[in-house]
């Protein structure tokens, strides 16, 4: 089985949803830089205040901050069982740093899963997205409704709309994706690690396809 995995794809492609399914099924540690930043924002730490000033506009948090955060997390013992990076790396500098970190802790990346999705669908998904304030579980007002409106099925927490899930910030996020993150697909393709999946098939089918690929 492949462990030490990177999930890539534009905002709204379904990385977070897939990560949560894979984490349960394959017993991997889920490392979402977006979730880590949102937790810091909620706790009003120094990191949180800094991160919010970038995130709310749709901009990327500076590389040194993000790399430091991931380095610390990946060095923890629980990651020995295998990890799932969601939302990192997003820039070439991050990809290069990750390569170094992975080598230094002897946990090399074994697969890069790329989720393809068209722009129209990304906008639809992001504009209807709701997230649990307590556990981060993702929902959609039309296609992934909770059993009780506004309440998380998993933990009972309140659902909210992310500050960066608006048209203006999404436009900026998509621009960053195209100019800074998408070129990383080539980087991983050259390393022979890249496998792409169409995320339009729906979350159950996508999960089946990706998990059987990872189990090979
Ligand atoms: P999405 O994939 O929907 O854009 P994430 O939760 O992964 O959402 O990220 C939300 C925001 O957090 C990003 O728009 C960015 O501002 C910040 N962020 C997350 N990961 C990184 C990263 N690796 N480098 C820089 N900024 C990041
Ligand atoms: Zn919840």
Image (cartoon, rainbow, N blue to C red):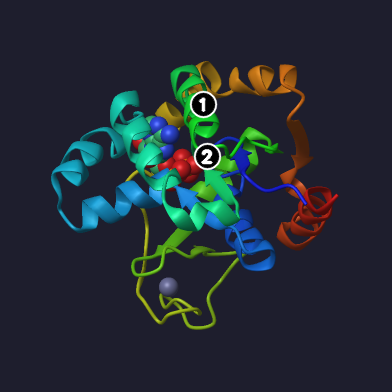
Horizontal placement of 163 versus 216: left or right?
A: left
* Element carrying mark 1: helix
For disc 1, the marked residue is: 177
Horizontal placement of 194 versus 13: left or right?
A: right
- Contact between marks 2 and 1 (CB within 8 A): the answer is yes
Point out which mark residue 11 bears: 2
Horizontal placement of 19 versus 115: left or right?
A: left
Question: Sequence-wise, which precedes: disc 2 or disc 1?
Answer: 2
Quadrant of residue 53 within the rendered picture: top left
Seen in the picture, residue 69 relative to 163 is either above or below; the reply is above
Q: CA distance from mark 2 to mark 1?
A: 8 Å
Label 2 CB-ligand 1 distance < 8 A: yes
Q: Residue at x 63, y 55 (%)?
A: 18
> Where is residue 165 drawn, in percent x and y?
40, 46
Q: Is residue 165 visible?
A: no
Q: Which quadrant of the figure shows ligand 1? A: top left
């Amino acid at each position: 089985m492949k462990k030490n995995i990177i999930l890539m794809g534009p905002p709204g492609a379904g990385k977070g949803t897939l990560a949560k399914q894979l984490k349960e099924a394959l017993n991997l540690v889920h490392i979402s830089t977006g979730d880590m930043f949102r937790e810091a924002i909620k706790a009003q730490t120094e990191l949180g205040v800094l991160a919010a000033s970038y995130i709310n506009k749709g901009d990327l948090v500076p590389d040194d901050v993000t790399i430091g955060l991931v380095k610390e997390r990946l060095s923890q013992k629980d990651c020995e069982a295998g990890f799932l990076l969601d939302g990192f790396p997003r820039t070439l500098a991050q990809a290069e740093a990750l390569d170094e970190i992975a080598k230094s802790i002897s946990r090399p990346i074994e697969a890069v899963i790329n989720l393809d999705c068209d722009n129209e669908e990304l906008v639809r998904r992001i504009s209807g997205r709701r997230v649990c304030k307590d556990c981060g579980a993702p929902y959609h007002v039309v296609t992934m409704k909770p059993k009780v409106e506004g309440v998380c099925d998993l933990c009972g927490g309140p659902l909210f709309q992310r500050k960066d899930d608006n048209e203006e910030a999404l436009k900026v996020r998509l621009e960053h994706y195209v100019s800074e993150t998408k070129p990383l697909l080539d980087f991983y393709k050259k390393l022979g690690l890249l496998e792409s999946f169409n995320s339009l098939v729906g979350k159950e089918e996508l999960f089946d396809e990706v998990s059987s690929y990872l189990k090979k």
